[in-house]
Amino acid sequence: MGIFLARRLITLLATLLATSLTVFVVLEILPGDPALTIMGPDANSEAVAALRTELGLDKPAPQRYLAWIVGLTKGEMGVSYTYKVPVGGLIVERLALTVPLALISMALTVVIALALGVYAAASHGRAGDWGVMAFTQLGIAVPSFWFGILLILLFAVQLRWLPAGGFPGWEAGPFEVARALALPAFALALVQAAILARVTRSAVLEVMREDFVRTARAKGLTRRAALWRHVLRNALIPVVTVMGLQFANLLAGTIVIESVFSLPGLGRLVFQAITQRDLVVVKNMVVLLAALVVTVNFLVDVAYAAIDPRIRLTG
Amino acid sequence: MMRRPNLLIGTVLTGIILVLALVSYLWTPHSAIDIDVTRRLRDPSWDFWLGTDQFGRDVFSMIMVGARNSIAVGLVAVGIGVSLGVSLGLWAAAKRGWTEELVMRGADFTYAFPAVLTAIMITAIFGPGTVNSILAIGIVNVPLFARVARGSASQIWTRDYVLAARAAGKGRLKITLEHVLPNILNILVVQMTISFAIAILAEAALSYLGLGTQPPTPSWGRMLNEAQAQMYAKPRLAVFPGLAIVLAVLGLNLLGDGLRDLIDPKLARKR
């Protein structure tokens, strides 16, 4: 396991470096003059020159890149051009909303997907299976932001049970926070759950045909006991893999969903930063989101090495 | 086709969207762009089949033109993904060794950037717009097609007929074009329909955020964004464009599933 972890860790670090380099090249080198991009084509040249000095753009690119990376490791990301506050602080403040939102919807996704997937596999070829498959087919086709709007229409506009958007802040207490996050989390979870339920179903079906399951049944285990004791653990590997990949979609999804529900999270911050051309924020946010995706995929690799020892040998 | 409901429903739904888009070039019930406040927020009627929006534009006409927009974005974005991705994948499978390793690690690495994130980077520099959203979605498709092409091409390279071709003195490029590509085409077509559906979803999300298609060109995502402001007055405005997206995506997904079952019946039975 030690060598496996070390190899994966080196790959992770290399990917993170490549990610940061890509973001740096795309946002600081490709546009030509980032100061001009920030201030717009109508700005006077003295103001642009002043901003260039302020952002350190007069230094050579390799030096800027190194300084940025060293700053990132210390949590220093520079100062936001529009908010005039350190970017690190801004991000931490917004993460406090986005991370719980992503985690709640991931948890919802897993619960819905496993329940539906296992149920469909257990009733393979019967009405229950067909129903779940039809539901997932539809779920995959529904854009999460539209589902969010429909949820608002039903639960906020018609029934008036939940707020249509906004966030009261953590100080409002867990009940109010849960009310504010329920609809966005569910909107994000539905589409992901539809995909994961399909993966779970086919993984469970695949394992149910294995010899060891037949042996377990032959030894007198009921279908249900064989399912819980032998099939589920073995079916988990593809499910966990897809979950890892889905986390990327979920993070990207928060950007859209936070706009639907006017939630002051990371997604909204990056969106506002674009409209205000705050490249310092955009650069750090994009690299942070990409790093989150890469790290989650690394954790998935490690997790399924723990579930299936065979992967360590081949990995 | 009647024995394959996926293929049937998929073809019909995709056909409907396609026809709507094509007809919109010749005819729409009303203008999809002209603003007329005297007829704002009308309910559905014989004159305005799905009613009008807050600017008095006919919703059905906007959905027709929106279909054109979605299909165009999907086609070009998938086109970028296919042309670059498949070339890279085929190249990797033919050369093997370092080239393969480099292309595939590159493909792995681009997974760190989901479409919305790529679009954010592009719009931060070049500004929002249809072309930039197409670029963003297209770029995300490149590693996907590279993987699919490399995976299936590698299998073809192990076949006896490829060995025979090599023994006959054919070069890598000739073998790739004459033997490998035709044999992986069916898999690529299935992936194309699925990617097309994902591109439509991504375009809708980007337009909803205001990063994609810009007004006055109607797009389904943008219509939903505008409808949200009228949610209390006219909730139906938020329903129709979403339904159009669902039907288009559902149609393409079913078509993809149906085609896969048709091409590889083994896979269909296994599922």
Image: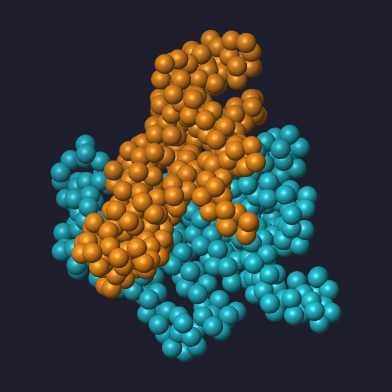
- Seen in the picture, residue A178 relative to A135 is either above or below; the reply is below
Q: Can I make out residue A88 in this image?
A: no
Residue toward you, B14 or A10 = B14
Residue B257 visible (yes or no):
yes
Name the side, left or right, on which A123 lies relative to A302: right
Q: Quadrant of the C terminus of chain B?
A: bottom right
Q: Chain B is drawn in which colour?
A: orange
Residue A5 is situated, as x and y percent measured from the top left of the image, at 46, 84
State the image quarter where residue A96 is shown.
bottom right
Give the quarter of the image for residue B54. Answer: top right
| Residue B264 picture location, percent across and down | 53, 54
Colour mapping used in the image: by chain
Relative vertical location of residue A173 with respect to residue A165 in this rendering, above or below: below
User: Where is A204 relative to A152, above or below?
Assistant: below
Which color was chain A given?
cyan
Q: Is residue A17 left or right of residue A299?
A: left
Residue at left offset 57%, top offset 57%: B267
Residue at position x 20%, y 58% in the image:
A57
- Direction from residue B113 to residue A230 in the image, left or right: right
Exactly how many numbered labels are in the figure?
Answer: 0
Closer-to-camera residue (A82/B257): B257
Residue A257 percent across, percent down from the top left: 55, 47
Vertical comparison of A61 with B186: above or below: below
Q: Nearer the viewer, residue B130 or A29?
A: B130
Residue B58: horizontal and vertical position, in percent? 53, 18
Q: In which quarter of the image is the N terminus of chain B?
A: top right
What residue is rendered at 54% in x and 67% in y?
A241
Name the foreground residue: A226 vs B125. Answer: A226
Q: Residue at x 71, y 37 (%)?
A: A154
